[in-house]
């Protein structure tokens, strides 16, 4: 049973005049984001900044040692409360190596403080002392290699390698006898170096797994309103280039309470597309299917069906006002109120070309007369409306504006004689321009959100279209200067 059904669907899709059509594969992506070398560099800077914030203050385990000091004997020494207070990174770099990000921060300095104490016993008494010390770490290099993979539609970060290497450290002891000072530095120098290297490595690994936990919490859909959501499930990839990476999401609008009846053509790869030479951090592309899914969903929830009983000037529709348009209507139903039942016959298919974004809308209007409590259909008119639109980036939303290009009406049937279609067309045009277009634009104006992390905003974005796709080239700025990725939850959309 199943194969013939599939065949029928395929045939229907081929004969349909919708360019988008009807075969759904699981890994289709309709919204893609390519992060350029510049964008990866920006992300690296944010990450390093966050890592430093996450690293400090960092408490290291105490170190205890028994040290033999000439003339004094065996001295028990303790370095406690060892705290990393600050890290300064002078340079950092990121590369893509074997589908993973290799981040290196080098020439870093770090500042630690600690308490010291010692005790030793002579014949009868125990001698002890305590004080503090500061440690300056020079020439520290931290390397982190992490892979970013797709685990069931969400990003997963895994540390492949993490290392910290310290070239030199300088310990300044406050107080203490000079014999102690030298003994302490000799005995503890390597231990402290290793302890700092280990602690930083462990802490960074911990930071990545915290970040990973946050990524796991990114919703797979962004709710647009109480009916509709954008499916941002990650599909495929991430696809790595030499210096860029592409993330693909499903990108279709869905109904929250039911499975949408949407099926689409397979997507074409478009990885090599750039921002026309401009150096931007991010290239986001939207397939026209995204807009078609929005239109299909709005159609399904009944937002493309209107009952009209008033004119744009708010006056009640009445056969008297249509006297000149349909004389026989007035003579049959003098001074009766009217009701127009306007519905789109299908959800409008959006077509994107290099020149423009447009759609053709097919609608049916039933002209009804209210006779007492009864609704009497008296005529039916079908119409074809062509609309073109522009899109723009407003904040972190892709918004749009539609404009009516042409309208043509055809009388389907009438029980009140022939109608003057050209004058009806003028009335309908007025209705469309004054009611429907503003209504549609109020929706388009709000737009829909880019799947972008909270705390970041698109900047200097520009838009271009190509065959079936809209591209947004943009830089990204961190709009929350004290954004703390690892502390706050950054993934709050809308
Ligand atoms: C640890 O050192 C910090 C200063 O770095 C100090 O404020 C804190 O009181 C010390 N803690 C203990 C338990 O000595
Ligand atoms: C890092 O370096 C800057 C100047 O290069 C300095 O002002 C700052 O105090 C340093 N940070 C720490 C923690 O010492
Ligand atoms: C270290 O000890 C000196 C003198 O004992 C004191 O003035 C200073 O505040 C101490 N520093 C820290 C960080 O505890
Ligand atoms: C990626 O790098 C390889 C080797 O360095 C090179 O052969 C290839 O052309 C590069 N690809 C692109 C798209 O730059
Ligand atoms: C969202 O997209 C994913 C990947 O294409 C798909 O598997 C999933 O069924 C979609 N969810 C809904 C509710 O359509
Ligand atoms: C409007 O038309 C639709 C279908 O064209 C029909 O289902 C609906 O009942 C009509 N409503 C009124 C009020 O005429
Ligand atoms: C239709 O109405 C227009 C003006 O509204 C008029 O000029 C035209 O002659 C009318 N056509 C017919 C066939 O009555």
Image (spheres, rainbow, N blue to C red):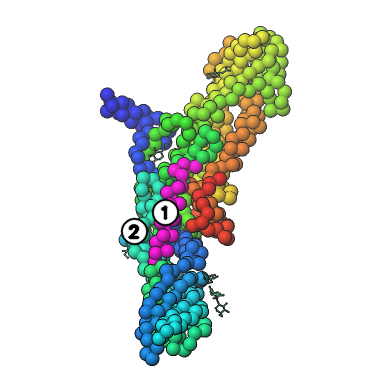
State the predominant SS element of the stretch in magenta. Answer: helix
Q: Residue at x 59, y 25 (%)?
A: 306
Left or right: 65, with 280 as reference point: left
Answer above or below: position of 254 versus 242.
above
User: Residue 404: image x %, image y %?
Assistant: 59, 35
User: Residue 433: image x %, image y %?
Assistant: 64, 33
Q: Secondary structure at mark 2?
A: loop
**Residue at numbered disc 2:** 99
Q: Secondary structure at mark 1?
A: helix
Q: Of 391 and 219, which appears nearest the observer? A: 219
Q: Residue at x 40, y 30 (%)?
A: 16
For the image, the number of numbered tags is: 2
Left or right: 115, with 369 as reference point: left
- Along the polypeptide, which appears first: circle 2 or circle 1? 2
Mark 1 vs ligand 5: CB below 8 Å: no
**Residue at numbered disc 1:** 212
Q: Which residues are magenta?
A: 201-222
Answer above or below: position of 273 versus 144.
above
Answer with the quadrant where ligand 4 appears in the image: bottom left
Q: Residue at x 43, y 52 (%)?
A: 213
């Amino acid at each position: 049973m199943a194969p013939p059904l599939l065949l029928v669907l395929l045939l229907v899709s081929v004969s349909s005049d919708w360019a988008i059509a009807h075969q759904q594969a699981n890994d289709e992506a309709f919204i893609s984001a390519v992060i350029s070398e510049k964008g990866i560099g920006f992300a690296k800077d944010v990450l390093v900044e966050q890592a430093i914030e996450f690293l400090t203050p960092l408490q290291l385990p105490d170190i205890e040692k028994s040290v033999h000091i000439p003339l004094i004997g065996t001295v028990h020494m303790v370095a406690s409360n060892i705290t990393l207070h600050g890290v300064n990174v002078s340079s950092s770099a990121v590369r893509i190596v074997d589908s993973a990000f290799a981040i290196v921060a080098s020439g870093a300095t770090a500042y630690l403080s600690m308490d010291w104490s010692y005790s030793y016993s002579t014949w009868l008494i125990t001698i002890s002392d305590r004080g503090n010390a500061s440690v300056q770490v020079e020439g520290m290099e931290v390397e982190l290699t992490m892979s970013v993979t797709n685990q069931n539609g969400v990003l997963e970060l895994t540390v492949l390698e993490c290392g910290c290497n310290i070239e030199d450290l300088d310990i300044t002891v406050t107080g203490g006898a000079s014999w102690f000072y030298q003994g302490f530095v000799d005995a503890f120098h390597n231990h402290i170096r290793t302890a700092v290297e280990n602690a930083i490595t462990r802490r960074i690994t911990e930071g990545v797994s915290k970040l990973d936990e946050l990524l796991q919490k990114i919703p797979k859909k962004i709710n647009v309103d109480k009916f509709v959501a954008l499916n941002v499930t990650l599909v495929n990839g991430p696809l790595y280039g030499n210096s860029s990476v592409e993330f693909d999401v499903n990108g279709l609008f869905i109904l929250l309470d039911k499975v949408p009846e949407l099926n689409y053509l397979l997507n074409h790869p478009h990885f090599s597309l750039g921002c026309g030479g401009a150096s931007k951090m991010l290239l986001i592309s939207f397939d026209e299917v995204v807009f078609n899914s929005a239109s299909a969903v709005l159609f399904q929830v009944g937002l493309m069906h209107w009952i009209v009983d008033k004119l744009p000037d708010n006056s009640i529709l009445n056969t008297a006002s249509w006297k000149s348009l349909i004389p026989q209507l007035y003579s049959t139903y003098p001074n009766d109120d009217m009701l127009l039942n306007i519905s789109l016959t299908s959800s409008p298919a959006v077509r994107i070309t290099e020149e423009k974004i447009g759609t053709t809308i097919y609608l049916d209007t039933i002209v009804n007369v209210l006779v007492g409590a009864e609704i009497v259909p008296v005529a039916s008119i079908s119409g074809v409306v062509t609309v073109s639109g522009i899109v723009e980036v407003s904040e972190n939303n892709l918004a749009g504006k539609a404009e009516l290009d042409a309208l043509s009406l055809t009388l389907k049937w009438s029980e009140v004689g022939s109608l003057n279609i050209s004058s009806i067309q003028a009335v309908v045009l007025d209705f469309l321009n004054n009611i429907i277009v503003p209504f549609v634009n109020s929706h388009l104006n709000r737009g829909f959100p880019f799947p972008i992390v909270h705390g970041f905003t698109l900047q200097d974005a520009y838009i271009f279209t190509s065959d079936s796709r809209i591209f947004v080239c943009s830089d990204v700025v961190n709009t929350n200067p004290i954004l703390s990725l690892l502390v706050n939850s950054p993934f709050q959309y809308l």
